[in-house]
Amino acid sequence: MNNESKKTVNLPKIIKVKEFADLIDQPAAQVIKVLMENGFLANINETLDFETASLIADEFGYAALPEKIDEKRVDVITTEQLSEILSQEKQTGRNLKTRPPIVTILGHVDHGKTTLLDTIRKAKVAESESGGITQHITAYQVPVKQERRITFVDTPGHEAFKNMRARGSGVADIAILIVAADDGVKPQTLEVIKNLQKGKVPMVVAINKIDKPEANPEKVKGQLAEAGVMLEQRGGETPWIEISAKNNQGIDELLETVILLADVLELKADYDRKALGIVLESHLDQRKGAIATVIIKTGVLQQGDSILAAEATGTARQILDYQGKRIIKAEPADPVVILGLDNVSKAGSVVQIEESRSSAKEKAKRIKLDQDLLVNEDKPSVKKISDSEEEEEKSITKFNLILKADVEGSLEAVTQIIKTIKGDDFEVNILTQKVGNITESDVQLAATSKAIIYGFKVKTPEMIKQTAEKNKVQIKNFDVIYKLIEDIKYEISEALEPEIIRDDLGELEVLAVFRTEKQKMIIGGKVTQGKVLNKAKMEIYHEQEQIGKGEVEELKHNQDQVEEVKEGMECGITYKPIGPMVKIQTRDVLKFYQEESKKRVIE
Ligand code: GDP
């Protein structure tokens, strides 16, 4: 069957078998059968991921499409959802207008990123009225020919940005890869190329420093080809320009090339909706309070809008453009500074506009909870039978850490031992391991990847301690290896869910049911197996199917309150529901158990 003649069905990332069956108008049993034929064992309450569900949909003649995100129903927009919303907008949006491209400059250290950014800024941005004291905000916009503009985002070298790109949240549309003609392709250049290719970010190559006598652009082109970057006129599609950032040579051509590429990419945004943006940087100012630099990805931000940016909320009391001038509204691709938030928010957080300050506040409170929920909801319960044996349904807790040590030798020793800490349900990830004191970029990385920083015989400068505190990052320093290792194990055990040990007690057959108050039911029955304990938990079975859960709130035998009733005896149980209250009927069976939670010990 070809795709055009197929019916389509919109599926969420995760869906219950039953809901899926309803969507494709099939009995659940039929769906379960087809799932089994395809190697998936599932019951109607289990969940399928998009991939599995679309495979099964296909079997029923449906083409599966990702579910549209209904922004009104999404409380707090995550970076992933933001990119989905933007791509939906691109496909279906109506009021779209061309917006400026957002561009970032990347390359090996000393190849001229800063110089190029400065040269462009000086050549193109008229000095502001405030006497040219352009604050260094992490982004600015330059005018180019025919009323077009380009937004440049200064990517601070810190890892937070690397992380954002890696997660594909894509602040920038286009990257300028800068390579010095006298130095050629270097390890960091290769790293950048790898990341851009992975994130599918289009690039323009700027071969810099061609004013230098030892410049060898041809050699650079050869090295780029080796690294998989095929340049235009050399059989590839990547545009390139030779420049001298220092002497302002080739800069206009570079900007025009960026615009040409932007046209090919058809970068558009909705100018009729409320803004969505991304926080580039934010800090606390003694006098002005929290200050956030934000890039608008779509829509319009107006002065006075109620804002939610991760845990920060507020009103856009003042909006400043990249020159520090007050403006009353900002449009797509505009970099702006927002004053009026009650807190700093992490680089990469989504900025969204709310109906009111109070709804923003309420959502900010829920944001943590929602994040936790998202993590759980993202995991389908149904897996292919063949791999379900090894990777049961257990979720793996990732424990991220950053390791700094005084010398290479101890760094290696500590790393070796950390690598031996293993478990079925957790994974220790050493994000970076380096010799040297703890730095700002360690803290940034720790903040974005929720890692703990471990130092072995190293120092933490006071300023870094403060940044860490502000970002709620833990720094732990040790002088003795085994203490450091013990601490890692302790932190892992804290991060893991405690082990729940279940102790089955016994079963009861329901002989009579008396309803008392609204939320209470008294069950009369006979213990057919084992025993019942007061306060025990219970599962309720109707015709062998579990229909609910509860707790023994009160246990009675011959009108007396008792703690235990043994097999063969009759008793009365006050049923307290766990989850929804279910209707218990005679002949139903109650299975009793106790649960004990035990803190995990990491060997
Ligand atoms: P970054 O580390 O990539 O930001 O590099 P910088 O912009 O700080 O440049 C490193 C050095 O290269 C500085 O001394 C610059 O003056 C120099 N530089 C940058 N661009 C050029 C150029 O086009 N020609 C020459 N001769 N030097 C340059």
Image (cartoon, grey):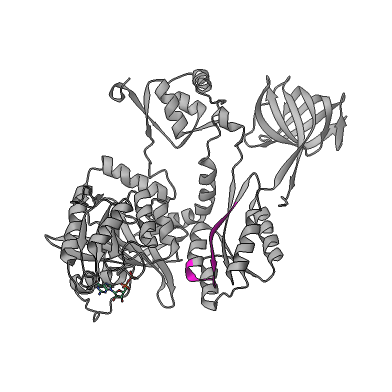
| Residue located 45% across and 66% down the image | 344
The answer to which of 72 and 18 lies nearer the viewer is 18
| Residue located 48% across and 28% down the image | 19
Q: Position of residue 116 (x, y in %)?
A: 26, 69
> Ligand 1 is in which quadrant of the figure?
bottom left
Q: Position of residue 264 (x, y in %)?
A: 20, 48
The residue positioned farthest toward the left in the image shown: 146
**From where the camera sits, is residue 32 visible?**
yes
Q: Position of residue 246 (x, y in %)?
A: 23, 74
Classify 363 as above or below 550: below
The image shows a total of numbered marks equal to 0
The residue positioned farthest toward the bottom in the image shown: 131
Q: Magenta residues? A: 428-441
Q: Is residue 491 left or right of residue 282?
A: right
Classify 140 as above or below 352: below
The answer to which of 2 and 277 lies nearer the viewer is 2
| Residue located 23% across and 70% down the image | 245
| Residue located 34% across and 50% down the image | 197
The answer to which of 47 and 185 lies nearer the viewer is 185
Q: Is residue 361 left or right of residue 91?
A: right
